[in-house]
């Protein structure tokens, strides 16, 4: 099983996740939306080697700390190939709404079915377009990091460039609801949940 620690960053209260394995001390960071000295201190305290920085999608509130963390850790940045353009375009990464930002390009792209090693465990990439064309979830033993696809009691917005409510609902129905109900959900914003709880109580899922 992975160990998961949450760091809430940026004024958008984005959940940045440190996911690690005690043996051999490897980690990934999911969605560093901003600089976080607290996150960096924790990585050093645990003597972790960050293997990858992974973005569930390309919006600036999930990617804003990429360049800083890559410089601090030497870890490569990965994103789905369909959201790679967000790094270079403030319109698509939504930074045009606050402070237009062009990030350095990703080092790696991922696609459906790819597996990311974290120690002896694996995170599998599930492509879940809807919030953005390249939105992904990351499935590990007992956990699903679901970005801005599903929240506790809600789902992600689809009114941003490249968003689609129909795709969002299709992704949730075909890619997420078919997973085991006891999965712990770690969303891009807000509290964690459990998939079976969302099946029963999330009003956006009742129609599925």
Image (spheres, helix red, strand yellow):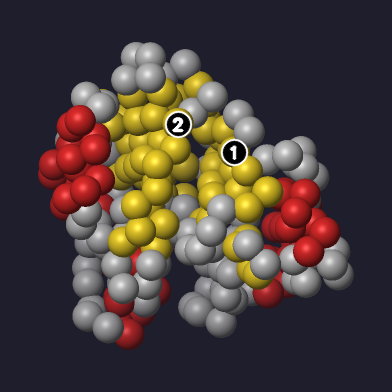
How far across and down, in percent of the image, does residue 16 sit? 37, 52
Q: Which of marks 1 and 2 is nearer the N terminus?
A: 2
Q: In which quarter of the image is residue 152?
A: bottom right
How far across and down, in percent of the image, does residue 77 sit? 30, 44
Which numbered dot is residue 143?
Answer: 1
Which numbered dot is residue 78?
Answer: none
Q: Quadrant of residue 91?
A: bottom left
Q: In this view, does 61 lie above or below 128?
A: below
Q: The residue tagged with tag 2: helix, strand or loop?
A: strand
Disc 1 crowd, CA 10 A, few/some/many (<14, 14-19, 20+): many
Left or right of 204, for residue 17: left
Q: The residue tagged with tag 1: helix, strand or loop?
A: strand
Q: Kindly identify the residue that appears in the image at 79 percent across and 56 percent down.
A: 199
Is residue 207 among what the camera can see? yes
Q: Distance between the residues labelled 1 and 2?
A: 10 Å
Q: Which of 113 and 38 is in front in this view?
A: 38
Q: Is residue 207 above or below residue 99?
A: above
Q: Kindly identify the residue that appears in the image at 44 percent across and 38 percent down.
A: 4
Q: Quadrant of residue 169?
A: bottom right
Disc 2 crowd, CA 10 A, few/some/many (<14, 14-19, 20+): few
Is residue 146 among what the camera can see? no
Which numbered dot is residue 3?
Answer: 2
**Callout 1 touching callout 2 (CB < 8 Å):** no
Q: In this view, does 28 lie above or below 191?
A: above
Q: Kindly identify the residue that appears in the image at 47 percent across and 16 percent down.
A: 120
Q: Residue furthest right?
A: 207
How far across and down, in percent of the image, does residue 80 sit? 46, 50
């Amino acid at each position: 099983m992975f160990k998961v620690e949450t760091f809430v960053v940026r004024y958008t209260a984005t959940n940045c996740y440190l996911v690690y394995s005690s043996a051999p001390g490897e980690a990934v960071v999911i969605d560093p939306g901003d600089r976080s000295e607290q996150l960096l201190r924790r990585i050093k305290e645990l003597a972790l080697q960050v293997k990858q920085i992974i973005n569930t999608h390309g919006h600036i509130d999930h990617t804003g700390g990429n360049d800083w963390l890559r410089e601090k850790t030497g870890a490569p940045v990965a994103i789905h190939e369909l959201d790679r353009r967000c790094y270079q375009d403030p319109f698509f990464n939504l930074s045009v709404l606050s402070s237009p930002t062009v990030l350095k390009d990703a080092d790696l792209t991922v696609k459906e079915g790819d597996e990311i090693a974290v120690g002896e465990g694996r995170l599998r990439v599930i492509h879940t377009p809807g919030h953005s064309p390249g939105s992904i979830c990351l499935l590990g033993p007992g956990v699903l990091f679901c970005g801005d696809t599903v929240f506790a009691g809600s789902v992600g917005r689809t009114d941003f460039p490249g968003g689609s409510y129909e795709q969002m609902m299709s992704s949730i129905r075909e890619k997420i609801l078919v997973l085991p109900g006891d999965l712990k959900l770690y969303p891009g914003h807000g509290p964690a949940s459990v998939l079976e709880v969302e099946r029963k109580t999330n009003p956006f899922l009742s129609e599925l």
